[in-house]
Amino acid sequence: MQMHYAFKHLATAATLVQQYNGELPLAAFLKQYFSAHKKHGSKDRKYISELCYCYYRLGHALLHLPVEERMKIALYLCSNELQSWEALFEETWLQQHTPLLSQRISFVQQQYPALQAGTIFPWLTHCSETIDTTAFAYSHLVQPKVFLRIRPGYEQKVPDALAQQNIPFEQADKYCIALQPNTSISTLLDVNKAAVVQDYSSQKVGGLLQQVKVLSPGTQWRIWDCCAASGGKSILANDLLKPASLTVSDVRESIIRNLQQRFKEAGITRYDWFTADLTKQQKLLQNRDVNLVICDAPCSGSGTWGRTPEQLFYFTNEQLQHYASLQQQIVNNIVPQIKAGTYFLYITCSVFREENETMVQLLQQKHAMKILQTEVLKGYALQADSMFAALCIKE
């Protein structure tokens, strides 16, 4: 990139982050801006977006610095190579730049000691105990990979299709493929039919569904996915536990419509659905006989902020309390309605104790649920999301 373009992109990105207030997703905000400013070509859009995302990857660190200075530091830390951005940096910084993130952090800390794990992610004391909080905080400086879950029957076809198109990938296991960040696969594969875009940790929740099969062999599964969202866990459960009958619900019909389109692409045609606000007391299971409830609860999303770093930047303590309260309401309304012997799988994409272990205590102490297994899924070590899952049974 020519020198004047690097500085021009930096100035544009700095203006954008000062205009952005976090109300829209950053991707949507940038899309709106670029739609209104056609002068930016595809490369311009790529570079400006990269700078904006890097700025938010620094979380709450170095906020006392001028925007452009902080943005350059963020770019330096987040980039494995600076080929396009050399004009922005002094020779010393260029000489010290290395592909190793830990070395880049050490160098920047010599100049800016305020850069610490706890300034990037100020809620480390709220994290589950088994999380390496330093590694987790610094993982926000690295863009997560795109993960595919190969669906049954396509175990060979999907890797073959990627290889034929010369798409670099790693096969984490028989059904999980890792792609480089920003890889687009919609033109390469039958998305949802052959493979589902699903994070590594989200796929690992399947291990708890497999556990249910082991504990109750031969069961005809009647599943209720009560916070179904786009249906990723439902498709996973369908693939692992079929033949199964499936009921899905969420708070708005627009969410269900999106799910129905995804189910259609996935070839899932037999299921029931309804809309319900699970924070409100109502009889939901009067005419529904279920033996497995999946509750992928609305949460802070703190285990996924590597994908949406603007949420790390704008998150507040009040929001944490809001989500913890929301989850308690949902659990308190659902669990009393399920019968003895029903499995309950509680899932969040959060790293916070208040949303995870505290909820398990509630299930045990208030609702007499037997906890069969809990798992903190530490995706931060694998360029993946971090999640929590607890498998329980109603006694």
Image (cartoon, helix red, strand yellow):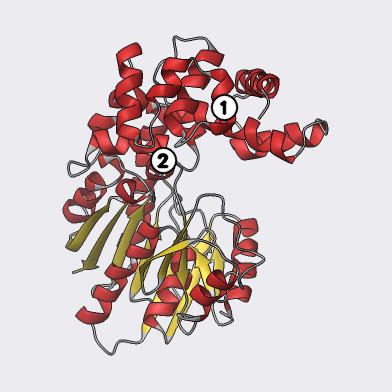
Q: Label 2 vs label 1: CA separation?
A: 34 Å
Q: Residue 226: tell me if it is visible.
A: no
Nearest-to-viewer mark from 2 and 1: 1
- The residue located at (58%, 34%) in the rendering is 50
Q: Is residue 361 left or right of residue 73?
A: left
The image shows residue 324, relative to residue 67, as above or below, that is below
User: Percent x, y for residue 139?
Assistant: 35, 38
Q: Position of residue 372 (x, y in %)?
A: 17, 65
Q: Quadrant of residue 273?
A: bottom right
Q: Please say whether residue 139 is visible from this viewpoint.
A: yes
Report x, y in % for residue 282: 45, 58
Instruction: Identify which amino acid the numbered label 1 is placed on.
Output: Trp
Asked whether, in this view, residue 263 is left or right of residue 363, the answer is right
Q: In the image, residue 148 lies at what x, y percent?
A: 47, 64
Q: Is residue 120 above or below residue 194?
A: above
Q: Residue 365 or 168: which is nearer the viewer?
A: 168
Question: Element type at marker 2?
Answer: loop
Q: What residue is disc 2 on?
A: 300
In the image: residue 366, left or right of residue 260: left
Quarter of the rendering occupied by the N terminus: top right
- Crowding around mark 1 (Cα neighbors within 10 Å: few <14, some 14 to 19, many 20+) is many
Q: Amino acid at mark 2?
A: Ser
SS under mark 1: helix
The residue at the point 51 percent across, 67 percent down is 196
Q: Quadrant of residue 203?
A: bottom left
Tell which circle, 2 or 1, labels the residue nearer the N-terminal end.
1
Give 50 or 33, whichever is nearer the viewer. Answer: 50
Residue at position x 41%, y 84% from top? Answer: 242
When asked about the image quadrant of residue 48, the answer is top right
Q: Which residue is mark 1?
A: 85
Up-down relation of residue 287 to residue 337 (above or below): below
